[in-house]
Amino acid sequence: MIHQFIFAAPKPGLTEKQFQEYWLNVHAVNFASKIPQIKKYQIGRRLPKLDQSESPLWNGVAEIWLRNDEDQIASLQTEEFIKGARADEPNWAAFWRSLVLDTEDSERFQYCDEPEADVVKLLVLGKRLSGMSLNEFREESRVRASEAAGQMIGLVSYAHYFTRDAMYSVGEAPLDVVHALRFRSLNVAHDAISSGRVNEFITALHPICEERYNHKIVVDENWVIGPEERK
């Protein structure tokens, strides 16, 4: 399964709220979700009370699940993508600020039952140290991140998503991993951030990561298709 992350920001003239509402309630519903190859689709809106950057790189993230390479290629050739989702992007997104990462749907550590609502997700993006091999980075990252996440109070789940090998076929991928830490409520996420436990998680990754490429965003979760796969 391909797990694609699309990090995006508003086009000039839109507020963060206008951008997020259009993405979730217009673009996702009327255009992107119509692409038949997409099996699951989720929108995360940046939560400024928790993600306190004054100049955030991104104001939201889409997560899209596709079965395989064949489905992904086919999706980019559909009328729903070309005349729908792609054509609509200039209406709300600053495409020059977008980041798309194709990752492998990876192992997941579940710590408690899924809450019915109000899950808050922290995404931490990373890039390996210069000169470090991908295999070495992935193995070290698995160990360091899963151990650090296991010390976190209030987590629903933790997962890491490594950038697919195909993104290195013609050069270097912009980033190598997305760590997803899901908290059971806004208050729990706030406590983890304000207490420094989130910083401890990120610090545990510093020995294997280029710190200047450590980015994070705190979002909510809004299923457009899912959580079960669309048939």
Image (cartoon, grey):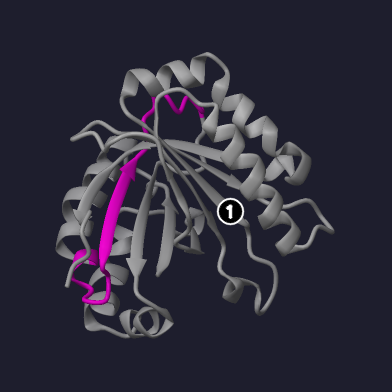
Quarter of the image with the N terminus is: bottom left
Residue in front for this viewpoint, 58 or 93:
58
Front residue (pair 61, 146): 146
Badge 1: few (under 14), some or many (20 or more) residues near its Cα, within 10 Å? many
Q: Residue at x 68, y 39 (%)?
A: 205
* 49 magenta-colored: yes
Looking at the image, residue 61 lies above or below residue 78: above
Residue 154 is inside the magenta segment? no
- Res 33 quadrant in image: bottom left
Q: How far from the left and from the top, in percent, is residue 91? A: 28, 57
**Mark 1 = which residue?**
177
Residue at (29% x, 78% y) in the render: 82
Which span of residues is magenta-colored? 32-54
Percent across and percent down for residue 158 are: 46, 41
Could you tell me how many numbered marks the image carries? 1
x and y percent of residue 99 in the render?
50, 57
Kindly identify the residue that appears in the image at 40 percent across and 24 percent down.
154
Q: SS for tag 1? A: strand
Image position of 216 (left or right of 9): right
Q: Quarter-wise, where is residue 166 in the image? A: bottom right
Image: 71 above or below 220: below
Q: Relative to 101, say whether 213 is above or below.
A: above
- Quick check: 97 left or right of 165? left
Residue 50 in the image, given as x and y percentages of width and height: 42, 24
The residue nearer to you, when weighing 168 against 117, is 117
Q: Residue at x 40, y 41 (%)?
A: 59
